[in-house]
Image (cartoon, rainbow, N blue to C red):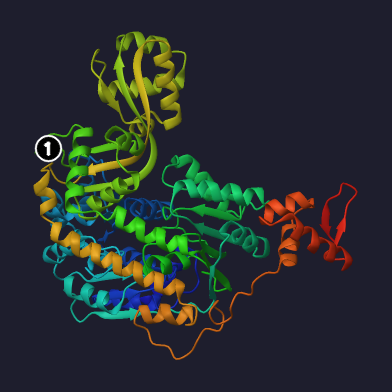
Amino acid sequence: MINKSLDILKTVYGFDLFRPLQQEIISSVLEGKDTLALLPTGGGKSVCYQIPGIQLPGICIVISPLVALIKDQVDQLKKRNIKAVGITGGISYQELDDVLDNCIYGNYDFLYMSPERLQQALVKERVLKMNVNLIAIDEAHCISEWGHDFRPAYRQIITLKELHPRVPIIAVTATATKAVQEDIVTVLELEDARVFKSSYERSNIHYKIENTGDKRQALRHFYNVQPGSSITYVRSRKNAVEFTLLLQQAQITAGFYHGGLSNKIRSRTAQSWMNNKIQVMVATNAFGMGIDKPDVRSVVHMQLPDSVESYYQETGRAGRDGADSIAYFIYNRNDIEHAYNQFVKSKPTADYLKLIYRKLSNYLRIAIGEGEEQTHTLSFSRFCATYELNGMQAYSALNALDRFSVISLAQGYRRRCSVSFRESGTRIISFAQNRPVANAIIQAILRTYGSSENHVLQINTALIATRSNTSEEEVNETLQLLHDQELIEATITNTDLQITYLTPRDDDRTINRFSRELERQNTLRLNKLKSLVQLVTNTTTCINRMLLEYFDEETDRDCGNCSNCAPIVARTTSEQILIALQNQPLDSQQICKEMNEDKDVVVAHLKTLLEQRKVLLTSHNKYKINE
């Protein structure tokens, strides 16, 4: 059977050979064995269940926690001409009914869904009728109470085993301590589970951690001497923009990526980076999931992530081709104090969650007992401004509501359109009859929503774009045109979040159900932050050794490459001047500004460099490197 798997690997994925452990894992699944696979980021976890899902008759059900991951994997499979479908938020009951029927009768190979979907009676009823060949649990660490990304709904996945007790289960993850591994096996009731675990050691990644008073200069210096594709991780959208501008001013090609950008801009920037048109992607952790770029030479952290697990996953996006790469962490004491302060300020208490949940429900006009499976777009900044909320605290609360399956939260820039008709549908169609694009859009709106005057309609621009075979941008332009012609009254609001209520609104009782677990998770999150701080601030122990020990992997040797094994040597002022001059000639004032150094100090070192013939003075009184 493995020969057939190898054939699929070649014809569908374009690879001649399996990566380490993939063949053994796939063989285990094809033999019908429950399997737990722990592979590093970029180790090809999805292939381990996708190939059996293609090879075996029937449909593979994949449980995944993130909408973005579901969409990405479904899109990738479709591009490979594999029949796959994902159930995400915002789908109507009729659409859900149709999707599930297609999975029973339409020869689909894959059905992706979130764990929350398994609680719906319709889903359970239809899954029971499906010819399921495999149950795959992606990001399986979410099952464990000891994991860094625990989602209680994951512990209900056992429903699938009850519906199809003879179907094998494969659980995959990149980060799981021994306690998390044991929890996964227990909760999923894996029978005689075969566990495949690759080493957490990444010998080609050299971990460098630098404590510096000037992080901006350290970042510029790093990219001046380190070529190759790179990701710089930051914690806020503002920092993503600021550090991108810093690098661009230093003549380093860079772009920024965060959840508040439109899909079009994010896609365009990501593609430029994938094609090596820009060297550095400065991004929040919204970037990286589903990205498989083998030639990333470095990953830089400018602020502390949430946990050692997050740090390990993010650094693992470097060096997937096996070539030497760098994981560079730039910090100072203020970052550590800020991380603790941020944790305290953003720690979601039960009382604060109740407050946010009530305000969110009121803002979205959801009545008590209603709202289930309703999807809403939200301008987060406007929501916070309306109730004078602290943005960091409010966003942390929304994430907690998502984690505990009260809502499903997805980032993504959109425009929300409220429309009321001032003229009849006939009059509007007449206006657009010589405008093919506008006519198609108007026809789609009228078919979808009708044309009742004096009723305010919430227009789903993505839906209208699909039904009119146009783009969202063209839909918005058409609505604006009709508004300008006074044919409709249109209010177009920029939104950056999509929220789906997973349960009917029940205010305090909704939060009370998990308040005790919330406190336990807050304590666990604090301990994980402390573990990360200990990793960052320890200057004597091999960083690679500390990472391995965190994941319960023993080692008897140091890596010899990290900053603790081979300390970063402080750069002299002369070295810093030479680095500043690498891209272009500068005068002494420009050099002082670039280095944030006193003029007398810079001039003294410039004099020495001139005497040593390492730099030359141009006719425009600028200094340049003597090549």
How many numbered circles does the render carry?
1
Q: Residue furthest bottom?
A: 556
Q: Secondary structure at mark 1?
A: loop
Q: Is residue 10 left or right of residue 219?
A: left
Query: Residue 134, can we see it?
Result: no
Quarter holding residue 516: bottom left
Question: Looking at the rendering, in which quadrant would you find the C terminus?
Answer: bottom right
Residue 509 horizontal/vertical position (percent):
8, 48
236 displayed left or right of 463: right
Q: Residue at x 35, y 22 (%)?
A: 491
Q: Depth check: give the residue in front, 120 or 60.
A: 120
Please, is residue 565 above or below residue 134 in the view?
below
Q: Which residue is drawn at the image coordinates 87% and 63% (left, top)?
A: 610
Disc 1 target residue: 370
Residue sitting at the far right: 619
> Foreground: 64 or 202?
202
Q: Quadrant of residue 623?
A: bottom right
Q: Left or right? Give the position of 359 relative to 341.
A: left
| Residue closest to the eye, 411 or 250 | 250
Q: Residue at x 34, y 44 (%)?
A: 391
Mark 1 residue type: Glu
Which residue sits furthest front? 600
